[in-house]
Image (spheres, grey):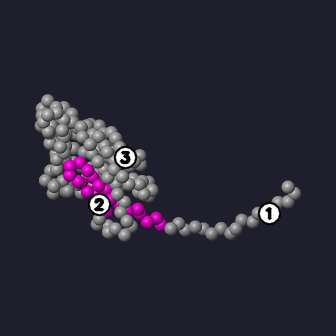
Amino acid sequence: MKRPFSRIVVALAFTLMQCQSPTLGMSEGPEKETTRVLVAVAPGYPPLALGSGITGEVTVRVVVNAMGVVTSAKVTDGHRLLREGCKEAGLQWKFTPAQDEGKTERSMELKFAFFIAPSDTATAKLTTVFKHPNRIEITRRIPQSEKLQRRQHPPEVHPKRTGY
């Protein structure tokens, strides 16, 4: 099964270019360092969560090395059905290299918000949007399940039981 990551990455890369390199403010120590997002990856909406009507926000804390590569990701908050995809997506983010040569690692939070739109929502509004500085919003609608064709079985005939 092909993952939707590639389509979302392309859409987010385009969004990032339009936003002129969004930045993440990170306040560690007396100076405030600004880190720019180079690659942002959004998770797909897990089918079980979507079908169950689960919405909400997932927070992922990522550790970024001096080169801007995410080395670890840990989900700190969010519904259990939404967590795994967010962790995987967080591991794929990339940032600008650290400006301070003495600093080897940085950490920050990423937020992924999942929304379910009403069934009459236009397809154009079912999007994944990068929100400045570190939030991605995923909006989908619950798919219309096909009506199951049920075979009609004749009523079962049970012999009368006597002699109890």
Q: Amino acid at mark 3?
A: Gly
Q: Is residue 4 on the magenta stretch?
A: no
Instruction: Give the mark, 3 or 1, whose residue is nearer the N terminus.
Output: 3
Q: Which residues are magenta?
A: 126-146
Which one is in front in this view, the residue at disc 1 or the one at disc 2? 2
Residue 19, which numbered label?
none
Q: Under tag 2, what secondary structure?
A: loop
Q: Amino acid at mark 1?
A: Pro
The residue where tag 1 is placed is 159
- Tell me how far mark 3 sits from mark 2, CA to CA: 20 Å
Q: Is residue 139 on the magenta stretch?
A: yes
Q: Amino acid at mark 2?
A: Thr
* Image location of residue 63, percent across then percent down: 25, 37
The residue where tag 3 is placed is 78
Q: Residue at x 17, y 43 (%)?
A: 25
Residue 125 lies left or right of residue 28; in this view the side is right
Q: Is residue 156 above or below residue 67?
A: below
Q: Under tag 3, what secondary structure?
A: loop
* Image location of residue 141, percent across then percent down: 37, 62
The residue where tag 2 is placed is 127
| Residue 109 seen from this side | yes
Mark 3: few, some, or many residues within 10 Å (few <14, many ≥20)? some
| Residue 70 seen from this side | no
Residue 42 lies left or right of residue 53; in this view the side is left
Pointer 1 with pointer 2, Cβ within 8 A: no
Instruction: Give the mark, 1 or 2, whose residue is nearer the N terminus.
Output: 2
